[in-house]
Amino acid sequence: MTYDEKICAILIQSPNISQTGVTCAGRGITLTIDLTGVTNAAEVKLGAATNTVISGDGRDAITLTTGSTGNDVIRYNTSIAANSGLDEIQGFFAGSTGLDRIELASAGLGVSGGLRDTDGVVLDSASAMVFGTAISAAATLGAGNVIVFATGFASTGSLTTFLTSAGAITFATADMDGSGNFISIYTDLAGTDTYVALIHFDSGAAAQATMASAAAVTVTNLAVIRGVSPGAMVAANIDIV
């Protein structure tokens, strides 16, 4: 029995796994694995077909088939507050050739203020993804809806410290009002992995021109993509659904 036939015979028996286009003849299968509400850490290993994994609330380990152009998707539907674990993704095929994707649900994430671009506009599934100019020092945010950091950070705490230091981040073309969340990618000190994170911003009683002036700034990691640097990522690797 081939690997695909084993998957067909065993994995799709789970109520949390649906399948489309299953051949069971060794030619590949397509799976949607829904881990919604699963609090334990799940380990998922996928074959060469086009597959979708909906992240759960645990610290999931997701391995894609390295080099496959199957355009796999890792989707985040649940509230960030409920997602208690940083997912680890291996075999992610980044760039315009690979086109594996991280998908974020604009409505389902449930984050206060929704997802915003660097001008404060609320993002939805119709928003075209645009990477901002990579930031390596104090900067004014350029136009875009994914903030890219070229400098490595040891932790979410060290990234937060940078964001809230005086003059580090100035907003693009308007003072930021209310609360919202920026999609960001950054790397660690080794520089070999990409962290996909949300930066939550709360302006407080009045609109603010800089991140340091905010009433609150927090960073929440969704996933670490092993072996892929932020410079290898393109806008097609992140989407809002």
Image (spheres, grey):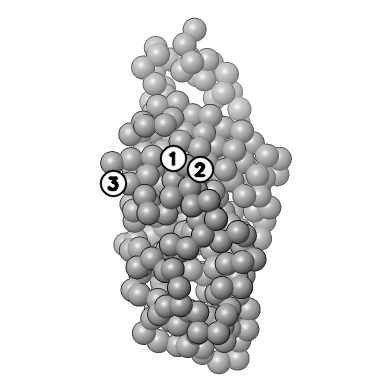
Residue farthest toward the top in the current orientation of the protein: 1
Above or below, 85 against 201 in this view is above
Q: Earlier in the sequence, mark 3 or mark 2?
A: 3
Instruction: Using the image as rendered, state which of residue 215 and residue 15 is in the foreground.
Output: 215
| Residue found farthest to the right | 40
On screen, 183 above or below 48?
Answer: below
Residue 221 picture location, percent across and down: 58, 57
Residue located beneath label 3 in the image: 96
SS type, badge 1:
loop
Instruction: Single out the mark in the foreground, 1 or 2.
Output: 2
Along the horizontal axis of the image, is 97 left or right of 159?
left
Quarter location, residue 110: bottom right
Given contact means CB atoms under 8 Å apart, are the residues at marks 1 and 2 in contact? Answer: yes
Residue under label 1, please give it. Answer: 92
Residues at marks 3 and 2, CA–CA distance in whole angstroms: 18 Å
**Element carrying mark 3:** helix
Q: Is mark 2 on a helix, strand or loop?
A: loop
- The residue located at (56%, 61%) in the rendering is 153
- Identify residue for label 2: 226
Q: How many numbered marks does the figure carry? A: 3
Residues packed near mark 1 inside 10 Å, few (<14), some (14 to 19) or many (20 plus): many
The quadrant where residue 189 appears: bottom right
Residue plotted at (28% across, 46% down): 96
Mark positioned earlier in the residue sequence (1 or 2)? 1
Alpha carbon separation for disc pair 3 and 1 = 12 Å
Q: What residue type is labelled 2?
A: Arg
Which quadrant, please, contains the C terminus? bottom left
Please indicate, yes or no, whether residue 23 appears anywhere in the rendered image. Answer: yes
- Measured as percent of width and height from the top left, residue 229 is found at 43, 50
* Residue occupying the point 46% across, 36% down: 91
